[in-house]
Image: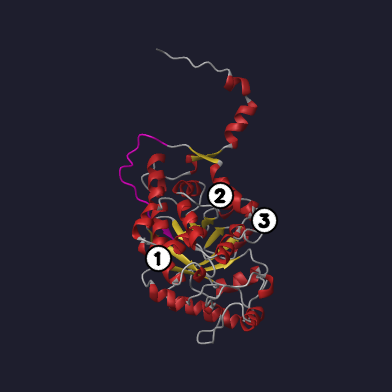
Amino acid sequence: MAEGLISDLTCVLDFEKEARKKLSGFAWQFFSRRRDAGQTYQDNVDAFKRYRLIPRNLRDVSIRDTTVTVLGTKLDFPVAIAPTAMQRLAHPDAELATAKGAASVNTGMVLSSWANHSLEEVAKAAPRGVRWFYLLFFKDRRLTRHLLERAQRAGYTAIVLTADQPSFSFSRHEKPTLPPVLVRYPNAYYAGDPVGLVGTVEVEEHLRATVKVPGTWEDVGWVRKNTKLPVVLKGILSAEDARTAVNLGVDAVYVSNHGGRQMDGLPATIDVLPDIVRAVDGKAEVYLDGGVRTGTDVLKALSLGARCVFIGRPALWGLACNGAEGVGQVLRVLRDEFSLAMARAGCAKVADITSSLVLHESYYSSRQLRHPRAINDKKLKSKY
């Protein structure tokens, strides 16, 4: 993409439109896939609009500090990149470019076990970047321990586990045929083992033989006991699961419905967030993904108790548009929108963002239902 065109993309949805033009039909279908009717995917986006901001005015917000500390690491702003699979379908540099884009604005990325570049390759591409590793559950715990050790040696600073994938389909006959692009999963093997191409019988057999489905709370507890790195549990939607995670010593709870890819009919993550924050009760950090498209969305999520939000598809759209620069530009758009939203809400720093800034739209409709005449017939009198 030409330099001039990247500057013409001024919001996240601009990147989505441009990415659709650039991606192959298969890649667009893979990245935008929604389960069943896509209700959960759409509700993730729409739910943010149902929250109303109540700004506090006449405050000095001439200088804003958007920095936040996440698991002890300072990020320039509270937006990081969620784990997403097979990024080489979006750009030849795949996760190498994503890591560079995140590092360029000093925020973090989570590398997927389904990544097309290894833990070590991504670390070398962005040595100063903040990187976490999204780890699968494996039947062979020696392989799990090996990957935990690889991640720590390569400078990854947290392990992310998933709670919302009780099954995988490894058969190439159950999904569209992959395009002629060399795609591999080097983070699902022992280092040094030959890694085959995705879609081949050999890789399918390897995954079927090694990946443990479903994962259980016992697996989460085992990982917690076998790594010195902080552990994040992703895919939490119930208060009960959040409390169980905290009791197992998980360092952060990550509210996610997998972007609507795994199951339809789930609640929007922003609607679930307050219940999870109350259940965790300050004993772990709380993150959110799903539907974040603007800096105002970020502000609302933080108002409702999230410490940081993650983006999945928007980062892929940036990657498809212009590699590392495209990823960085998407993040800069969200950073600048978030800073402006803070100013307009009367917040000079992230600590100023509190629950008093946001109300659900139902608050106003319920008031009108309770007191329709008092609201509609009230006479406003002026003292002048």
Q: What number is the disc on residue 264?
A: 3
Magenta stretch, main secondary structure class? loop
Q: Earlier in the sequence, mark 1 or mark 3?
A: 3
Question: At x 64% / y 66%, what residue is drawn?
Answer: 165
Percent from the top left, x then y, of residue 34? 62, 58
The part of the image, by quadrant, that contains residue 51 is top right
Percent from the top left, x then y, of residue 62? 30, 42
Q: Which residue is mark 1?
A: 324
Percent from the top left, x then y, of residue 327? 42, 61
Q: Are marks 1 and 2 in contact (CB under 8 Å)?
A: no
Separation (CA) of disc 1 from disc 2: 25 Å
373 and 181: which is toward the camera: 181
261 and 81: which is toward the camera: 261
351 drawn magenta: no
> In the image, which residues are magenta?
56-71
Label 2 amino acid? Val
Q: Are marks 1 and 3 in contact (CB under 8 Å)?
A: no
Label 1 amino acid? Ala
- Disc 2 crowd, CA 10 A, few/some/many (<14, 14-19, 20+): some
Q: Which residue is mark 2?
A: 45
Q: Is residue 171 visible?
A: no
40 displayed left or right of 379:
right
Q: Is residue 280 visible?
A: yes
